[in-house]
Image (cartoon, rainbow, N blue to C red):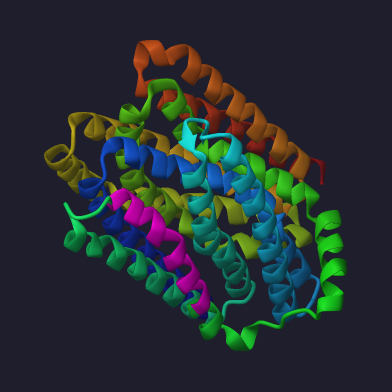
Amino acid sequence: MAINNKLISYLSGNLGVFSIRFFYFILLTFFLDTEELAEFTTSISISAILLSICTYGNYNLFMRRNSQGELKESVLGEYIVNSFLALIFFSIILYSLSLSFDSILNISTKVLLVIFIGEFFFTSIPSLFKAYALSAYDNNIFVDALTNIVTAILLLLTACSMFFFKDKIDLYRFWLFSYPIVGLLSFFLRVFLWRGKIRLPSIKMIPLALRMQFSSGHSFMVSAVFRNGYLNLDRILILNILGPQIAGYYAISFRFFNVFLMMLNSFSGVKEARLYQIAEESLIKLYEEVKLINHETIKYLIYSIPIWGAVAIGIYISYPKECFYIFICLFFLCPFQLLTFTFLNVLNSSGFENQRLFYMLLGSIIASLISIFMASYLSWLAIILGSIASSLTVLCLAKLTLYKRINNE
């Protein structure tokens, strides 16, 4: 029962965060044009891939070291320091590139640098605290959810402040300026709320901690790069194949879709730490846990259909018709991605890291080929069909891998 209460707390926190982010993005759609939205969202997608290298598998390493009995506070502090050092290194590289190249993948290099720094505070740092919270079902889950909600509220207030500057300043530049600043403020807030849970390493221990992370986190880092590349490929492809206007429409629709996707995926996410523990005991038990997760996830998806319908009507009324059609098609992608996410977590927790990497690479290739060769005929629909085909491929291969190992036990 205690675990169920913590699960409800975690899911409620996620609902609050996704709802607030949903509202701040809605505001942005009325302040920024479609080309600016396309650049902003695609920068987030590219940043997610770069941050996978920056964090170098620290989320998975935290879970592993915690399961081995290491002190969570020390591991958390160690990876925070390592992450900041990596942030500085990558920021210098991006800044150097901005001096020579105006754009990368049709994205302004300077904009990418700003979004990269902001996303570090909005995603990379919170993922470490999430790992801490999920490693034990205690009150830290509530603290983590509360911190994320406050952070999202800060972003929402920043977006609301644009009402006062409309027609006075360049709103896109204002948003880009504010984004990393709000991220930094959220970090200070998080450190304050978690101040008793962080134990920073001594300066002498930092080089050793970096070497340990580089030696043990390589496979996790590579998997994370391919995972984020796999998950963000559609937004990068659509901008470079179909241009900023269609990419802007897709960005609007995808943001609505992503609220549902991430909320429904929270049930799988909160169980990830448990998957590591069960995988150590028995793959048969792991299989039963996966069946439960998939059943609950699809059940919640069915329950949410009326809300999908209400949102679709709102999109039809408020945005260009292309956004409505894209959103409807993304609904059919949702169940495939949810099941795929679960099995990617299973492969990650049960020692199939090389297979997981290969399947995501294969899925990305399939999505790219379908998108590139069919876009001239189907426009944005080719991107979604590529994502569906990619998800189906990864899902089937992951299930087959798990079943084979179970039959061999």
Asked where in the image residue 329 lies, by quadrant, the reply is top left
Residue 341 rendering spot, x and y as whole percentages: 55, 46
Q: Is residue 331 visible?
A: no
Q: Is-magenta flag for residue 173?
A: yes
Please tell me which residue lies in front, 45 or 141.
45
Nearest the viewer among 138 and 375 is 375
Q: Which residue sits furthest left?
A: 317
> Looking at the magenta stretch, what is its main secondary structure?
helix
Q: In percent of the image, x 49 and y 69: which residue is there?
A: 184
Place of residue 176 in the rendered image (x, y in percent of width and height, measured from the top left): 39, 54
What is the residue that sits farthest to the bottom in this orientation?
196
Instruction: Count every numbered label the image shows and give the total.
Output: 0
| Residue at (46, 46) in percent of width and height | 111
Instruction: Answer above or below: position of 5 versus 101.
Output: below
Position above or below: 209 against 240: below
Q: Residue at x 11, y 40 (%)?
A: 317
**x, y (%) of residue 302?**
33, 47
Q: Which residues are magenta?
A: 171-188
Q: Is residue 120 magenta?
A: no
Q: Position of residue 139 (x, y in %)?
A: 52, 83
Residue 325 visible in the picture? yes
Residue 59 horizontal side relative to residue 386, left or right: right
In-image side of 59 versus 380 (left or right): right
Q: Quadrant of residue 124?
A: bottom right
Residue nearer the viewer, 278 or 108: 108
Q: Residue at x 33, y 42 (%)?
A: 37
